[in-house]
Amino acid sequence: EAGVTQFPSHSVIEKGQTVTLRCDPISGHDNLYWYRRVMGKEIKFLLHFVKESKQDESGMPNNRFLAERTGGTYSTLKVQPAELEDSGVYFCASSQVNYEQYFGPGTRLTVT
Amino acid sequence: QKEVEQNSGPLSVPEGAIASLNCTYSDRGSQSFFWYRQYSGKSPELIMSIYSNGDKEDGRFTAQLNKASQYVSLLIRDSQPSDSATYLCAVEPGDSSYKLIFGSGTRLLVRP
């Protein structure tokens, strides 16, 4: 069974540009989560999808971040416009039921 | 006070010894608790979940939960150098959400 996949693995963009991160959950997992780890900090929750619906977006830092999950399969997280403080590692996780979450390899975002 | 607290370490143990990793949490309503292992530059890997008071064993790993003391621990028996990693404690808060609140992690070093 394939795990959670994320693309790209690394992205370097300039401040003010737009970046879109993609996550493909484990097949059959209705629950999809986005997390972020900025330098020196804990992994922090961003939002939770159940199928295509946003169940909890309490962790989204501001309206420069837009997450979508059209069709309830893969998800994208767009940052527009990117700021320096958005640099970090963005993790996606999925779960079949609302318990054990399995993480993807992450996308390392560097904003210069 | 952080929601999930862990000693950052490093915790250094000799090969073959028992490694004991500890975590405290602040939300008394929390119901689900997880231990993840993260190698440098890699994604968090789920190794244990525990939902009720007491011990849960899986191979060389034992998770212990004491909700009255708001304390969860992970014991690793017969520690191997390959166990050297950062161990993350994650707690699902008691607010009916399914997000995970992570501690900052404890770095474990197993000396050959």
Image: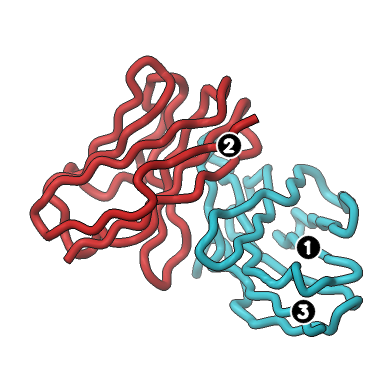
Chain colours: A red, B cyan
Amino acid type of the residue that numbered disc 3 sits on in the rendered structure: Val
Residue at 80% of width from left, 44% of height from top? B52
Identify residue for label 3.
B110
Question: Same chain for marks 1 and 2?
Answer: no
* Lateral position of residue B53 relative to residue B90, left or right: right
Label 1 and label 3: CA atoms lie apart by: 15 Å
In this view, the mark in front (1 or 3): 3
- Quadrant of the rendered structure where residue B68 is? bottom right
The residue lying furthest to the left in this view is A16
**Nearer to the camera, A73 or B70:** A73
Label 1 and label 2: CA atoms lie apart by: 25 Å
Amino acid type of the residue that numbered disc 2 sits on in the rendered structure: Gly
Residue B58 numbered tag: none
Residue at 56% of width from left, 63% of height from top? B103
Query: Vertical placement of B32 versus A26: above or below?
Result: below
The chain holding disc 2 is A
Which quadrant of the figure contains the N terminus of chain A?
top right
Identify residue for label 1.
B74
Amino acid type of the residue that numbered disc 1 sits on in the rendered structure: Leu
- Quadrant of the rendered structure where residue A80 is? top left
x then y, percent, for residue A104: 51, 44
Label 2 and label 3: CA atoms lie apart by: 28 Å
Which SS class for mark 3?
Answer: strand
Residue at 42% of width from left, 68% of height from top? A41
Reading the chain from its start, which is encountered first: label 1 or label 3?
Answer: 1
